[in-house]
Image: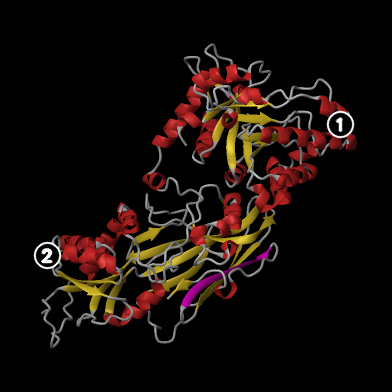
Amino acid sequence: MESKNLVGLRIKNCENLQNQYQIGSKAGFAFVGVDLFPPCKNKPRSRQEIDELLPFVGSEDVHFENGMSMSECTVGYISEWIDCDSSDEEQSLISQYGLKKEIAWAVHLSLSAIHIPLRHANNVKLAQVLTSFIKSQVTPCRFWITVPLCLQTDSAFEDNELSSQSSSPWHWWNELVTLAGPVVSESLFLVLEMTLNLPEEGVISRWISEPVAALALSTNLFISNSKGFPILSRPHQTILRRFLKLNAQVILTGESWHGRGFVVYRQYVNWIWKCTCEARSSYEEQSLGYENRLQEPLQPLQDNLSSATYDVFQMDPYKYKAYEEAIYLALMSRSGFNGFANSEGDDITPAANKQIIYILGAGQGPFVDASLQASCRSGCPVRIYVVEKNHNALLTLKRRLQTEWANEDVHLVPGDMRCLDNPPAEKADIFVSELLGSFGDNELSPECLDGAQHMLKDDGISIPVSYTSYIAPLQSQHIHINASRAESYSKFSNRIQEASETPYVVRLTNCKILASPQKAFTFTHPRKDIATGSNERYCCRTFTPKDDGVIHGIVGYFEAVLYENVTLSIHPDRHSPNMFSWFPMVFPLNIAIPVKTGQDIKLHLWRCVSSRHVWYEWAVTEPQTSKIHNSAGAAYTIGL
């Protein structure tokens, strides 16, 4: 998001909307929030009274005579007297009638969003009105549902018992989107009212998992610095930064307490945003634009990757430095060995003390460079066989053989590592491969390395030595909605049969991990049981969340031991610094499963293997039972 689109201003009692908007626009505000209908001194008591109400914002206010329009920069606020779920039945019916009139008018004006506050736990009738209205519309509409970040001890909201943990503002919102369902929920977004007293981390992280469109900042939250300018306290700054990272906008509410007006508040928020952007890690920079986007996992065994894909991965400095260090340590540990023997008919004569390295799945050659660097550092000479099946990547490798590696002992071996037509005559001392996916084994590293193991010496080393996957219960309304509607994505049409039962690679931002990840599957190379063992796996893991939440899926991570103490990890507690080659894997659920604090969550995951495919199946059996997703690989498989 650009700074010019960041901050909006709530305007009350606006006499001339166009004039106020132009003033606000010149002051740097991106949008304004205005009342759709004039405030009522007394609540309407009949439909006739509502019918007689004329809109406060008319078509002439948002559409200018010169053809310009401010409709996309205007958020329409529903009248404060409307409460569809009022305990007063008559007031409830009148409110429903009034709400339908106001939101219909807002859609008629093509406003960017319609603002509706949640006042209490029971919002069933509101959900029914919104669901019916949204489904009846031809063009999409956006609703900004406003709730406080948390309830305050002196809260003016109805019912004192609502301050309990079991009925917080998040529970109000969750009930609303549950009643609405995934399709309607695409139109529902959150506006969080920042409160003076801030909640604990569990509450904030739960809000992070929701589609937060904006934060409402009251001017009463600001304090004055030594120069008299308004600023937020450090705890409030921290929370603001976290939501700005999610591309949330900010809407200022209340009265200005500074002589220069609202512009100083806007400038301060923009400064916070600028500092937040400048503090991004290289991981955050490289993943911009991928936030919460469902990506089909790569299948490099079945598909030939493009040069652009290789280039993105080769920009990851940590991974290649880690591989170089692992190769260096492996060379140092084997540099005293001399297990070579001449082979008749081989036109390459083995040299004493040369370590034989196979680069399995070389791509465009970065692991060749890492191996040569490790050889130089260790003083151990090497002979490198570069194995690659991608015919396009082979052209790049041939060119590098004739230029950069012309004076090196590097040899190209085209073909699938599992069944080479002309394998090297000498076996490898060291395998170097990077066949890891976001879940460790999902790019079929076990099957590939098992198929190549006959080319590794009995005492040979595989880099990586092992890799372990981890799973945890995931809460993310974003992911749930995106997976539910992904059937319409043309890019998923060929390989994915059912989008809600397909694993995805996702740069997770709007999410909450409901409990710490636990180990799922581990694979070790070289395998000692290669003749009898299987790469099929099953695990059942139990988790206990600390807060109420909703299970929308299973998130997967991996860690790899390259050699000795050299590791790669996307585990959230020990992520390799600024490594961006892998985002987490998500196994979505086709239904959302609510869970209470202290309830057990039981997750099941299978890795299934046939002669032609590998696939995952997954299910939840506690706190309630889901179906087994992707049974028999009906929705998605990985080709062997």
Residue type at mark 2: give it: Ala
Looking at this rendering, what residue extends furthest in the top direction? 259
Q: Is 338 on the left-hand or right-hand side of 101?
A: left
Task: Give 500 or 514, whichever is nearer the viewer.
Answer: 500
Q: Who's the residue at 38% across and 69% down the image?
A: 466
Seen from the viewer's position, the closer of residues 489 and 288 is 489
Question: Magenta region, mostly helix, strand or loop?
Answer: strand
Q: Residue at x 48, y 74 (%)?
A: 614
Magenta residue span: 613-622
Tell us which disc is closer to us: 1 or 2.
Answer: 1
Task: Identify the mark at residue 406; answer none if there is no mark.
Answer: 2
Q: Position of residue 58 (x, y in %)?
A: 68, 24
Q: Where is residue 390 in the image (x, y as percent from the top left)?
A: 30, 69
> What's the residue at 57%, 27% (across, down)?
70
Locate residue 282 relative to residue 179 in the image: left or right. left
Q: Residue under circle 1?
A: 47
Q: How crowded is mark 2: few (under 14 residues within 10 Å), some or many (20 or more)?
A: few
